[in-house]
Amino acid sequence: MFNKILLLLLLGGSLFAQNIYTLERSLEIALSESYDIKNAKYSLINSQKRLEALKLGLNSSVNMEFDLPNYYRQLSSQFNTTTGSEEFYQVGATRLEGRLFITQPIIYTNSTFSLVGSLFGRDQFSDVTGTSRDYFSNLSIRLNQPIFTFNSQMANLERAEINLAQTERNYSKAELDIIYKVTSAFYNLFQAKRNVEITREKVKQTEISFETASNKYKAGLIAEVEKLQLEVDLAVSKNQLLDAERSYEEQLRNFKLTIGLPMEEEVDIEANLDYSIVNIDEELAINSALENRSELLNAKEDIYLQELTIDETDSRSELKAELNANYGINKNDELFENIFGEFQDNRSVVLTVSVPILDWGKNAREVEAAKAEYNRTELNYNNRKESITIEVKSAIGRVKASLARVQVLSKSVEVAEKSYNISTQRFDAGKITSFDLTQVQLRLTDAKLNSLNAIVDYKIALADLERKTYLKFQ
């Protein structure tokens, strides 16, 4: 008696430890813990941080460099005025230097403005002059301004902004895909669970029928072949139950993986199979899909990105110029305190003009390749547009077909149950054979499974239509 009580307590504890999952709870967990959502989230963070880094790069940057020390010692050939010939002398220097760079990109003009400062002190030595020490300070303002060229800074910012917008759309699409994937996995698992229950019920019904047939055979009321037929049916139904249980365990593992649950967690599900008839406006559904589908919006922006690539490639063969201007003040002296006053100035302006003459058509071919890619991107956009329209129409057709099946098959279960109850009574009364009872039982099982499959197909079809149209129907 004690062992039975202990067993019941253990079983009760095991059942109590199970976590019951509804579709809503499963979706909530999947949208925070599943592999797919985490992967999409990391991609989104990657694009966000890249854009933030690019924008921060448009601010002033400050860098410092130090040579601690810069030392060299070598033989140097110098002209000796006394002997009238080149001779080698040992020369060298030890220099301590610091450099400061403040750089400011100017995105609107694609230029760079810099403030550069340097300060060093050095000891020089040679076999000719001996050892000497001096100091040097320098501060200069520099401008680098490309002219007649493609604005690469602006283009890089636009690309990063578009990349982030595309990633955000992909994240939203990933959420919708996860909702559909979890919904499908949830109802497939519930379908497998109900299949086990229906098959188990069939086994019980067959056991009762076999027990009745065995008693009738012992009483000489039926032939042995009828009892044997029900014995075979019982073995077949038990085998079907084993297959159903195996399928359920497999679906359960897939479900845990899909929503991000540990494999060792005890899980059970509860589903609401009530359904409502939804009215679908095909034109509204198609227009919503064309306005919101991330694949189509991203493909449209890919066309613009390819236009940028064509302009950038074509600009390489055009006349371009680069202006480099510099103004600075500096001072050199043997005393350190003297290098901070009475500066001398230096200035320079260089305008470099580049004129492409001959590249054997290399750039022209690169432009043609970029235009071909543009045409492919445009073709891809138009093809996606047509594909999405067809997808939505197919999804609507699937919803309507599955709804029609639900309405027909839900009534067949009630009819099959009544037929089975009547047939069981007739078999007990000896008015029908075991074969007749088996056929009625098969029809009942098939009716239950077909009705279940139809409702599950309808709910999954609605979930599929919702993710493809960005509309809520349920």
Image: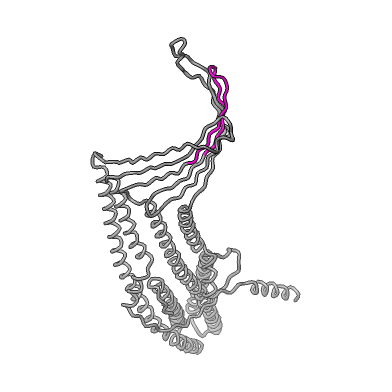
Pick the residue in front: 215 or 304.
304
> Horizontal placement of 355 versus 254: left or right?
left
Q: What residue is rendered at 48% in x and 45% in y?
A: 115
Task: Give the answer, above or below, for where 390 lies relative to 320.
Answer: below
Image quarter in which the C terminus is found: bottom left
Decide: is 333 above or below 435.
above
- The secondary structure that dominates the magenta segment is strand
Between 1 and 377, the one nearer to me in the picture: 377
x, y percentage for residue 97?
55, 35
Residue 165's image quarter?
bottom left
Give, as a single range, the part of the protein colored magenta. Answer: 118-139
Above-or-below relation of 219 to 8: below
Quarter in which the N terminus is drawn: bottom right
Expressed as whole percent of the image width and height from the top left, the position of residue 240 reads 49, 71
The part of the image, by quadrant, that contains residue 176 is bottom left
**Which residue is pictured at 28% across the width and 64% down the height?**
382
User: With 356 as the anchor, is 426 left or right in this view?
Assistant: right
